[in-house]
Image (spheres, rainbow, N blue to C red):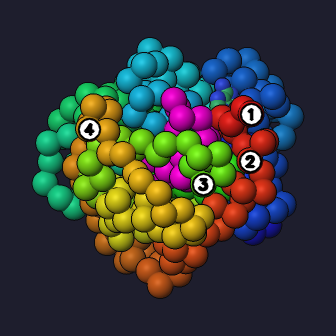
Amino acid sequence: MNKKILVTGGSGMLGKAMQKVLPNAVYLSSKDADLTNSAATDAIFNKHKPDLVLHLAGRVGGIKANMNNLGKFYYDNIQINTNVLESSRKYNVEKVLSMLSTCVYPDVISYPLRERTIHNGPPHHSNYAYAYAKRMVDVQSKAYRQQYGCNFITAIPNNMFGPNDNFDLEDSHVIPAIIRKIYEAKKFGKEVVLWGDGTPLREFTYSHDMAKIILFVLENYNDPEPINIGNTREYSIKQIASMVCSIYNYDGKIVWDSKGPPGQFRKPSSNEKLLQLGWDDNNFMSMHYSLEQVCDWFDKNYSMARGVTI
Ligand code: NDP
């Protein structure tokens, strides 16, 4: 792609995976510009004058972090997204691809999740602030398309995991939490306590696979409606835990703590649009292989991993 591409959130888990599939783009972290600040956002756009923007930056966390920081998650995400889209408009960016999340979908809904339904009811109460802020990316992108003719598109990734994830037990998503707990049980003899009963089903996409989809969508998708992206195969939390146990060779006990915060039972999404666009569902790496990569990364980077303090 012979274009200057700016990637916000370039230091995050997805941003780092993106660097592998798109090495020549400009990758930003919050140290380059605090995107909650509109002047700082303008300044970084003025500096780089990108043709295309991959907007991956956001305040991100698991259920617990979301529930404990509703205001912060709302404010940071609404500011970051508003500023990035407005600066993209001002600096005549040809195309922006922004990340939503399956959290934007209404809590009470028929499955599979289809893109046209994202505003059809309130999202799950546990992360409504993050979800509404993300929904506004869809609203702002469509409004700018209508008024200014901006080619701003949005994608809805399901749960991601990969190297460089956040492994903070108070603040992480489910897969990094499982990996860390089982790793520490094997290495330091700690007890493994996992939230819930392990039966909820989720779709998970390896960050490297997601980066490849994002590039594909950036090149091929131009519609105002969001597009669901990711691997739609469902796994129970118990299945993931069992794979991680086998990778780390851990045969000890797992305590399932049903007092933990409840999530939705399942959130299968439709990947019909992505397949119609020409994405081949056979492109995904297997769950076991992907988990092996992350477990291996975590082992090698334990003391430096985000959220781990020894
Ligand atoms: P990470 O938490 O790993 O990375 C977040 C990125 O955003 C980092 O580069 C961070 O910079 C940057 N950032 C945060 N606050 C600011 C700020 N104020 N100014 C500038 N940059 C900022 O997130 P992921 O890579 O996991 O997620 C990428 C995108 O995908 C996000 O938009 C997220 O909402 C979405 N998503 C993620 C899912 C997942 O499972 N992880 C699921 C669905 C959607 P720094 O490193 O400097 O802090």
Circles 1 and 2, Cβ within 8 Å, touching? The answer is yes
Q: Where is residue 309 shown, x and y percent of the image?
A: 72, 32
Q: Residue at x 18, y 58 (%)?
A: 111
| 197 left or right, relative to 240 | left
Q: Secondary structure at mark 1?
A: loop
Which image quarter has ligand 1? top right
The residue pinned by badge 1 equals: 310
Magenta residue span: 166-182
| 139 left or right, relative to 310 | left
| 192 left or right, relative to 23 | left
57 or 51, nearer to the observer: 57
Q: Amino acid at mark 1?
A: Ile
Which mark is nearer the camera, 2 or 3? 3
Which mark is nearer the camera, 1 or 2? 1
Q: Is residue 171 magenta?
A: yes
The residue pinned by badge 4 equals: 258
The residue pinned by badge 3 equals: 186
Image quadrant occupied by the C terminus: top right
The residue pinned by badge 2 equals: 302
Task: Say whether mark 2 is within 8 Å of ligand 1.
Answer: no
Q: How far separated are the C-alphas under marks 2 and 3?
A: 13 Å
Whichever of callouts 2 and 3 sits on the residue coming sooner in the sequence is 3
Q: Amino acid at mark 4?
A: Ser
Position of residue 288 relative to residue 237, above or below, is below
